[in-house]
Amino acid sequence: MIVKPSADGLALSLSALPKRGPPPVHLWNPPYCGEIDIRIARDGTWFHEGTPIGRPGLVKLFSSILKREGDRFFLVTPVEKVGITVEDAPMLALDFDVTNKGKDQVLAFKTKTEDVAEAGPNHPIRVDRDPKTGEPSPYILVRANLEALIDRKSFYRMVDLCVHENVAGKDWFGLRSSGVFFPIIPSADLT
């Protein structure tokens, strides 16, 4: 008998897992069971069968079992793997805290699903620019090949912390966190 993957089935299979720490998704390689009608919109809203998932706890649970393989995203448990649709990044960074200043500055980002990532060597920031409009889309690596789109208000706050630095012979406008300089835009493009 073939069982169609469902959101309820995923949640049920996760209820038996130990509650300490994040699930070891990186260790799980279950068989692919098909697609499930779950979509993560660019604004971080999770949808199931076209309807927003209104239970934050369920969204947080599903985000904890999110896995990326190449350009595809999956929800995985020890026994099943189902494909989902992600419009941009699977997470959304809503805010960040700043500690220290200058070269000792540290930015700690918090996502809509309550993940926290301190920008630095293990959690780099990158910015894509739309080739037509030049509009920036900033991202931070949160965990295991999963990025968060940094929301607009946080990006504007980041820009206020930016400085100019020379990287490989080219001047960049960017910011520092945890001892790493993250280039945002070439300084020459700001004129």
Image (spheres, grey):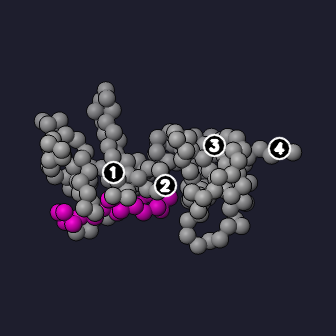
Mark in the foreground, 1 or 2: 2
State the mark number for residue 146: none
Residue 7 place in picture, x, y as percent: 69, 51
Judging by the rendered image, the residue that carries numbered circle 2 is 144
Q: Which of the image's four quarters has the C terminus?
A: top left
Q: Earlier in the sequence, mark 1 or mark 3?
A: 3
Q: Are marks 1 and 4 in contact (CB under 8 Å)?
A: no
Q: Is residue 108 magenta?
A: yes
Q: CA distance from mark 1 to mark 2?
A: 14 Å
Q: Secondary structure at mark 2?
A: loop
Q: Earlier in the sequence, mark 2 or mark 4?
A: 4
Give neighbour class at mark 1: few <14, some 14-19, many 20+ (Cα, 10 Å): many
Disc 3 residue type (three-letter):
Gly
Residue under the image location 60 percent in, 58 percent down: 27
Disc 2 residue type (three-letter):
Ala
Q: CA distance from mark 1 to mark 4?
A: 42 Å
Read off the magenta span.
101-120
Q: Secondary structure at mark 3?
A: strand
Q: CA distance from mark 2 to mark 3?
A: 17 Å
Corner quadrant of residue 108: bottom left
Residue 171 place in picture, x, y as percent: 14, 43
Judging by the rendered image, the residue that carries numbered circle 3 is 83
Q: Is residue 4 left or right of residue 48?
A: right
Q: Secondary structure at mark 1?
A: strand
Judging by the rendered image, the residue that carries numbered circle 4 is 2
Q: Is residue 133 visible?
A: yes
Q: CA distance from mark 3 to mark 4?
A: 17 Å
Q: Is residue 178 magenta?
A: no
Judging by the rendered image, the residue that carries numbered circle 1 is 125
Q: Are marks 1 and 3 in contact (CB under 8 Å)?
A: no
Front residue of 182/60: it is 182
